[in-house]
Amino acid sequence: MQSTDVVQGAQQRALALPDARTLGNLFIGGYVALMAWEIWARVLTPWIIGGPLEPPGLVISLVSAWTGYELSLPTATAAHYLVGIVGYPLAYFVVSRALPKWDAVLTAGVWLAFTLFLAVLAAKGGLTGAMAGFWCVVTAVSAIRFTRLPRRIVACLAWGSFTWFNALGLFAPLAGLPFLLLEWGGDLSFMSYVGHVVFGFVAAWVFEVLEAGEWPTRRA
């Protein structure tokens, strides 16, 4: 099987519990991806918009909204790391191995939800030029699946986009925050989108490469 067909081939097999090797590959991918996220969120993002991305703050808000309990910052940070290294990789494994055409489903779902929300904002007169530009970026990333790029790249990008929507489209409203944080101007949401695409892509890519036995390279 060619390396670019690993994701597709894995989808065609029945979902089975991951063995120790697969779990290790998942968590390695999650760790590498989380380190990439931290660089983007804490180093690069402040240079661009003046402040970092703070996922632990979302964790604190979510727990407080549903339980009334205020998590400490170290505890929320630990939860953020646990989700990034363990939670999202396990979710990727289940989705990619159990759901037929999962990447098409996630890509279409994220694009459609984002587009409909911006359409509502436009109808209310709240759509800005920056948000329209944001839509163009999301549309361009979504449209990559119609190119000749390898399936693995397309699938990993789809997972990255979904992790953004999951964080800001599902968990943020559950925490009492604006949907996708767009009511805050859009810059924070855009930086989060880029960071999550990088995170999800790296997590899925590293896992698939390790799982296929292709790391670091194979000689021809």
Image (cartoon, rainbow, N blue to C red):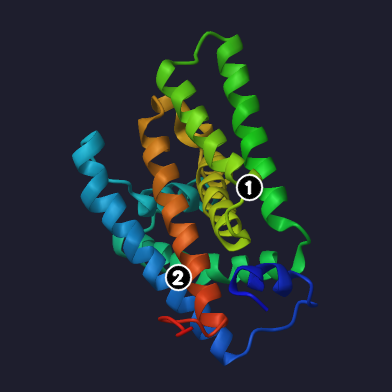
**Residue 162 image position (x, y, % from top left):** 58, 50
Of the two numbered discs 1 and 2 on the same chain, state the one appearing first in sequence.
2
Disc number placed over residue 30 in the picture, else none: 2
**Distance from Cα at disc 1 to Cα at disc 2:** 23 Å
**Residue extending furthest toward the front:** 220
Say which residue label 1 marks: 145
- Relative placement, left or right, of 129 versus 208 is left
Under circle 2, the secondary element is helix
Disc number placed over residue 114 in the picture, else none: none
Reply above or below: 63 against 168. below
Looking at the rendering, which quadrant does residue 29 occupy?
A: bottom left
Q: Residue at x 66, y 70 (%)?
A: 5
Q: Nearer the viewer, residue 174 or 7?
A: 7
Q: Residue at x 30, y 58 (%)?
A: 38
Q: Nearer the viewer, residue 65 or 46?
A: 46
Reply above or below: 203 against 68. below
Reply above or below: 37 against 143. below
- Relative placement, left or right, of 35 versus 69 is left
